[in-house]
Image (spheres, rainbow, N blue to C red):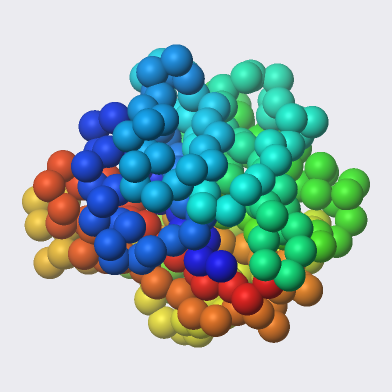
């Protein structure tokens, strides 16, 4: 089972790029974030044409939004929380009819947090920390995850080599110590396993995002690993391979994130 995740940064604008993604990664399940599309305008039929007959989406005008496109049947988890009571379309959960038995899949888009890493001065940063804290408490209350996968743009690069310069990034939102600790607590709360770092040792650089602000993103290579795939402990033995589709950052009208995929034998 190949599970991919991509912050597409507008599903309608970048809809043609999905053909390139499917050609390169051939995912069985594709989780999207930042679809920026109200549900009534979501391009369902166009996306089904890429080979995904089963689609769930949760969107709003102009920003946020998540979607799950799948070749495997699934049931939507309607009972999952409305994080921070904002109704801002940042999470979608499904139960997949996967080989070997049902797999619970969660697609998250964590708030970016604005520019200032200060809870009191920056409401966006406070929202980010509150969101992660709620998700952590929810996972802890449910106990250790079982046959579960959690993916998405979590907007935190936790490890030293998840950013281009650990020292330079310590006071930059996405790599501050308070965010790193918060993400670690979330990961520990469900005993989640970092599937990308399962394949790429922690002492090696690993990025999934490069800023639009860079004149030449590839030459400067000032990246961050903001996109994640976590699996429950009982799926670790089924991890087969991973892919980070770095060439996607050079696609026409590219997203600033690139697709990430993990193959699992569940």
Q: What residue lies at 69% left-to-right and 37% top-to-bottom?
A: 76
Q: Nearer the viewer, residue 160 or 247?
A: 247
Q: What residue lies at 45% left-to-right and 40% top-to-bottom?
A: 33
The answer to whether one can see residue 213 in this image is no
Whole-percent x and y of residue 95?
A: 71, 48
Locate the C terminus by quadrant: bottom right
Q: What residue lies at 25% left-to-right and 38% top-to-bottom?
A: 14
Q: Is residue 9 left or right of residue 254?
A: right
The answer to whether one can see residue 216 in this image is yes
Does 210 sit above or below residue 167? above
Does 184 sit above or below residue 73? below
Which residue appears farthest toward the left when viewing the image? Answer: 215
Does 129 sit above or below residue 204? above
Does 262 sit above or below residue 78? below
The number of numbered discs placed on residues in the rendered structure image is 0
Q: Is residue 137 left or right of residue 238?
A: right
Whole-percent x and y of residue 152?
A: 52, 50
Q: What residue lies at 27% left-to-right and 38% top-to-bottom?
A: 15
């Amino acid at each position: 089972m190949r599970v991919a995740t991509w912050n597409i940064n507008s599903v309608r604008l970048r809809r043609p790029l999905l053909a390139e993604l499917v050609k390169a990664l051939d995912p069985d399940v594709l989780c999207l974030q930042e679809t920026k599309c109200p549900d009534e305008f979501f391009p369902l039929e166009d996306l089904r044409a890429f080979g995904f007959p089963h689609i769930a989406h949760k969107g709003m005008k102009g920003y946020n939004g998540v979607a799950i496109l799948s070749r495997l049947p699934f049931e939507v988890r309607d009972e999952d929380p409305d994080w921070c009571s904002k109704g801002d379309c940042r999470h979608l959960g499904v139960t997949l009819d996967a080989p070997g038995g049902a797999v619970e899949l969660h697609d998250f888009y964590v708030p970016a947090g604005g520019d200032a890493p200060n809870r009191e001065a920056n409401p966006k940063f406070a929202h980010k920390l509150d969101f992660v804290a709620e998700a952590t408490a929810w996972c802890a209350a449910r106990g250790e995850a079982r046959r579960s996968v959690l993916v998405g743009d979590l907007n935190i690069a936790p490890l030293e080599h998840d950013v281009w310069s650990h020292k330079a990034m310590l006071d930059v939102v996405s790599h501050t110590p308070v965010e790193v600790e918060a993400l670690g607590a979330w990961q520990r709360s469900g005993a989640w396993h970092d599937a990308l770092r399962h394949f790429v040792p922690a002492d090696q650089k690993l990025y999934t995002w490069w800023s639009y602000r860079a004149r030449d993103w590839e030459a400067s290579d000032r990246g961050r690993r903001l996109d994640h795939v976590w699996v429950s402990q009982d799926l670790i033995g089924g991890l087969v391979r991973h892919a980070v589709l770095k060439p996607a950052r050079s696609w026409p009208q590219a997203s600033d994130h690139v697709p990430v995929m993990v193959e699992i034998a569940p």
